[in-house]
C-alpha cells in the first residue's frame, strides 16, 4: 500500500514513524512545501520518498493531510480526481468548516480525524516515536465516509495504538474549543503578560515547574494556531468568555478578601483531576 503524507512536521512525521513500525511493507511518500522539511524527513527516515507535486500524491492508496487547517481546505479542492478507492484522511484540529468544504465528488473518499495528541514543538525534527500510542483520535461524521474508507482508517489508527471516538463535527469543535484551543490561548496570554512585566533575569531566576507547565504550549506554531483560532472562532470566543467569568470571580474574591469562598472555588477546580 502507498500512503502519501502531506505535511512532514510533528504530526505527519510522527505518523510516518508509527506506520513504518507497524506496516513495514507500506511505501510512504511525503510532500511538503518547505524544502528543508523534505530533506530532514528523508534523512530521519520518516518517509521513503519525497515528491514535489500533488499529482504524485494522488497515486497513493491513502492520503493523509497533516497541514494547517486552511491548507487542508485548499488541498481538498485539488484532490477531486482521486480514484474511488482512495482514502483521504485529514488530521486538522477543527472539523466543521473542513467538512463543509469537501468537494461533492470526494465526500465518500474523505475521513475527518483529529488525533488528540501533540507537543509544543514543530517541524520534522520534532517527530517522535509513540506520539499516537494510547491516544484518542476523534472521527467526525464517520458514517458519511465510504465503507472502504472507514475500514482503512479504522485499521490504520487501531494498529498504531489509538483509541477511536466518534462524534459529529459541530460537537467536536465545541469540545475542542474548551479542552484544547482555549488552553493554548491562555498559554500565549500568560507568556505575553509575564514578558511585558518581568525582565528575562527575573523570569529565569523564579520560573518554577508550575509556570513552565502553563507556558510550555506557548512555544507552539503561531501559523498553525492562527488557522485553528480562525476556523473555530465562535466556539473559542465562547470558551474564553467562560474563562473570563471564572478569572473575574477569582479577582473579586481576592480583592474582597473572601478567603473561604476562594478556598471552595479552588476545591471545586481540584475535582477536574478526579475525572482525568
Image (cartoon, grey):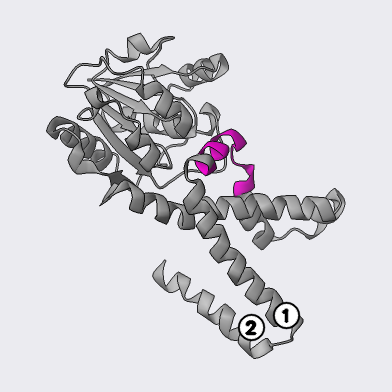
Assess disc 1: are there few (<14), some (14-19) or many (≥20) residues with their C-alpha within 10 Å of its C-alpha.
Answer: few
Which residue is the extreme one toward the left?
Answer: 147
Percent across and percent down for residue 105 are 23, 22
Q: Residue at x 54, y 54 (%)?
A: 237
Residue placed under numbered mark 1 in the picture = 254
In the drawing, does residue 44 fall left or right of residue 241? left
Residue 172 lies, with reference to residue 46, above or below; the image says below
In the drawing, does residue 105 fall left or right of residue 116? left
Residue 195 shows in the view: yes
Element at badge 1?
Answer: helix
Residue placed under numbered mark 2 in the picture = 262
In the drawing, does residue 151 fall left or right of residue 52? left
- Characterize the magenta stretch by its predominant secondary structure: helix
Mark toward the start of the polypeptide (2 vs 1) = 1
Q: Residue at x 51, y 52 (%)?
A: 236
Q: Which residues are magenta?
A: 217-229
Assess disc 2: are there few (<14), some (14-19) or many (≥20) residues with their C-alpha within 10 Å of its C-alpha.
Answer: some
Residue 135 shows in the view: no
Residue 89 lies, with reference to residue 30, above or below; the image says below
Element at badge 2?
Answer: helix
User: Residue 73 or 198: which is nearer the viewer?
Assistant: 73
Q: Which of the 4 image quadrants contains residue 248? A: bottom right
Q: Which of the 4 image quadrants contains residue 36? A: top right
Separation of marks 2 and 1 at Cα, in angstroms:
7 Å
User: What quarter of the picture does the N terminus occupy?
Assistant: top left
Amino acid at each position: 500500500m502507498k500512503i502519501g503524507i502531506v505535511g512532514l512536521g510533528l504530526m505527519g512525521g510522527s505518523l510516518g514513524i508509527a506506520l513504518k513500525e507497524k506496516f513495514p511493507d507500506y511505501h510512504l511518500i511525503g510532500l511538503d512545501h518547505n524544502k528543508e522539511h523534505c530533506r530532514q524527513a528523508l534523512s530521519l527516515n520518516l518517509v521513503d520518498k519525497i515528491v514535489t507535486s500533488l499529482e504524485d500524491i494522488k497515486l497513493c492508496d491513502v492520503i493523509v493531510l497533516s497541514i494547517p487547517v486552511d491548507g487542508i481546505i485548499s488541498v481538498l479542492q485539488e484532490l477531486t480526481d482521486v480514484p474511488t478507492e482512495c482514502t483521504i484522511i485529514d488530521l486538522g484540529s477543527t472539523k466543521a468548516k473542513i467538512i463543509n468544504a469537501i468537494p461533492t465528488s470526494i465526500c465518500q473518499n474523505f475521513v475527518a480525524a483529529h488525533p488528540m495528541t501533540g507537543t509544543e514543538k514543530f517541524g520534522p525534527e520534532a517527530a517522535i516515536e509513540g506520539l499516537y500510542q494510547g491516544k484518542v483520535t476523534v472521527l467526525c461524521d464517520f458514517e458519511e465516509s465510504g465503507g472502504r474508507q472507514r475500514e482503512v482508517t479504522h485499521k490504520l489508527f487501531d494498529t498504531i495504538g489509538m483509541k477511536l471516538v466518534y462524534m459529529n463535527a459541530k460537537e467536536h469543535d465545541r469540545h475542542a474549543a474548551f479542552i484544547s484551543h482555549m488552553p493554548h490561548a491562555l498559554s500565549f496570554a500568560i507568556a505575553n503578560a509575564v514578558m511585558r512585566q518581568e525582565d528575562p533575569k527575573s523570569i529565569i531566576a523564579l520560573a518554577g515547574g508550575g509556570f513552565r507547565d502553563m507556558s510550555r504550549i506557548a512555544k507552539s506554531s503561531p501559523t498553525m494556531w492562527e488557522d485553528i483560532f480562525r476556523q473555530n472562532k465562535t466556539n473559542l470566543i465562547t470558551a474564553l468568555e467562560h474563562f473570563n467569568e471564572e478569572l473575574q470571580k477569582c479577582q473579586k474574591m481576592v480583592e474582597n478578601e473572601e478567603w473561604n469562598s476562594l478556598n471552595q472555588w479552588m476545591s471545586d477546580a481540584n475535582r477536574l483531576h478526579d475525572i482525568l
